[in-house]
């Protein structure tokens, strides 16, 4: 046997790779919800949307609807399900308004206690203690820069400890990228792991993105690790780098001093952040919806322009259309291969043959195994 082939196989022995049977299936999904998604700090949105009193955002963490709300300057998170008869209290992804259930109009306070119950005396007769027992379950909130996280189950490491050296990266990104130019939630018929893995290597770029990403970046992928998280960096093609230099100049966009290439961070379990030429940030979560489905929630940001007059102008509009269109096209190409791989993995038993170019996937699998081995 060829020595190199043997070495590569030894680099990621099959028992260190998530077997296909464990990508999907109700039992694995239930275990992931319990051991990963309920215990990890999960990114749910941006503090930009929570600046004013009564601003709120909602998010779904592996089947649990969560609201995060600004109560007089303090962010608190609650289960977004009414303790009367299960309606969702806030229905929109973000907005401003007190937590009032739209079904029968129960009003909840900053402790999640229903303080306004229409016809209480007549129909329920709840005293204060009874109302407190009907409080919405509360969850922990952690904020790093503008990135807001929620943890469903208390205990374990604090957010800063979990982020490690990537905490300061989130601070930096929060200062840099303030101007959201696109956001959407795209349903994928693929398990969240299969979906996320499409973002952890550039080996697929030539075959999957021949007209898009292949022309945008070079193929060198330098990887590094921070606990359960990882980073991959590649250089933009000369044409792309020139295009971005021109855009930065004409639109007066700031450029990061720290992130100069295409820098991609994965924060376990499902947050991915890509920064292009230090001028564009893409934030994605691969949200688990079920064993065979995920939602890709993406947001695109630019920095604050030093030439405000360009905003809404034709050049800025053309650049935004180009960047947003490119992003959506690439994601759709990724969706097609991820959905195909998801259908395929349900037909085999043998673990994937990971190469050295897929080392971030191997590291992701290691982190997954460690979480799943915990009691
Ligand atoms: S379900 Fe919320 S008030 Fe009735
Ligand atoms: Fe891709």
Image: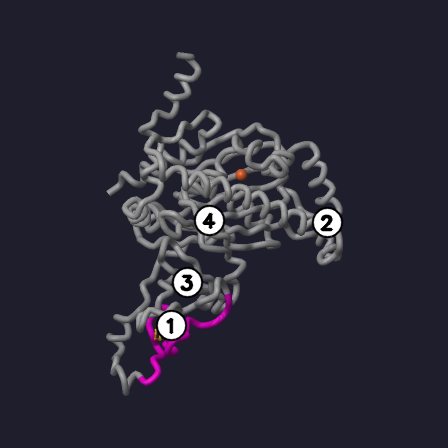
Q: CA distance from mark 4 to mark 3?
A: 24 Å
* Residue 113 drawn in magenta: yes
Could you tell me which quadrant the C terminus lies in? Answer: top left
Label 2 Cα neighbours within 10 Å, binned few <14 / some 14-19 / many ≥20: many
The residues tagged by marks 3 and 2 sit, at their Cα atoms, a distance apart of: 36 Å
Residue with the mark numbered 4: 188
Element class at badge 1: loop
- Residue 251's label in the rendered image is 2
Viewer-nearest of discs 2 and 1: 2
Instruction: State which region is magenta.
Output: 95-119
Which dot, 4 or 2, sits closer to the camera?
4
Between the residue at mark 2 and the residue at mark 1, the CA separation in whole angstroms equals 44 Å
x, y (%) of residue 317?
71, 54
Task: Report the image quarter containing ligand 1.
Answer: bottom left
Q: Measured from the top left, where is residue 268 in percent x and y? A: 41, 42
Badge 4 element: strand
Tally the marks: 4
- Quadrant of the rendered image containing residue 218: top right
Structural crowding at the residue carrying mark 3, measured as other residues with C-alpha within 10 Å and reported as few (<14), some (14–19) or many (≥20): many
* Res. 67 mark: 3
Ligand 1 has an atom within 8 Å of the beta carbon of the residue at disc 3: no
**Residue 368 location (% of width, % of height):** 35, 38
């Amino acid at each position: 046997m060829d020595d190199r082939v043997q070495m590569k196989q030894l680099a990621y022995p099959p028992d260190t790779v998530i077997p296909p049977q464990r990508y999907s299936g109700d039992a694995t999904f239930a275990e992931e919800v319990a051991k990963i998604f309920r215990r990890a700090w999960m990114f749910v949105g941006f503090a930009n949307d929570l600046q004013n009193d009564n601003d709120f955002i909602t998010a779904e963490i592996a089947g649990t609807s969560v609201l995060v709300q600004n109560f007089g300057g303090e962010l608190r998170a609650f289960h977004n399900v009414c303790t009367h008869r299960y309606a969702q209290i806030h229905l929109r992804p973000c907005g401003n308004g007190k937590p009032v259930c739209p079904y029968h109009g129960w009003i909840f306070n900053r402790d999640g206690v229903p303080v306004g119950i229409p016809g209480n005396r007549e129909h329920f007769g709840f005293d204060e203690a009874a109302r407190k027992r009907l409080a919405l379950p509360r969850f922990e909130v952690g904020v790093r820069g503008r990135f807001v996280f929620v943890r469903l189950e208390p205990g374990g490491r604090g957010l800063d400890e979990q982020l490690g050296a990537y905490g300061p990266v989130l601070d930096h990104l929060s200062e840099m990228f303030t101007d959201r130019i696109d956001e959407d939630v795209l349903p994928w018929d693929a398990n969240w792991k299969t979906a996320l893995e499409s973002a952890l290597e550039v080996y697929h770029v030539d075959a999957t993105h021949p007209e898009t990403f292949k022309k945008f970046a070079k193929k060198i992928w330098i990887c590094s690790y921070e606990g359960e998280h990882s980073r991959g960096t590649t250089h933009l093609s000369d044409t792309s780098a020139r295009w971005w230099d021109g855009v930065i100049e004409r639109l007066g966009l700031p450029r990061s001093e720290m992130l100069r290439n295409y820098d991609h961070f994965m924060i376990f379990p499902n947050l991915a952040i890509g920064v292009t030429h230090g001028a564009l940030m893409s934030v994605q979560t691969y949200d688990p919806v079920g064993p065979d489905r995920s939602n890709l929630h993406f947001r695109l940001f630019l920095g604050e322009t030093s030439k405000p007059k360009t905003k809404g102008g034709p050049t800025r509009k053309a650049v935004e259309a180009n960047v947003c269109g490119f992003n959506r096209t690439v994601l759709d190409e990724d969706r097609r291969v991820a959905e195909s791989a998801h259908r395929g993995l349900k037909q085999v038993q043998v673990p994937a043959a990971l190469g050295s170019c897929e080392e971030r996937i191997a590291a992701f699998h290691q982190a997954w195994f460690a979480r799943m081995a915990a009691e």
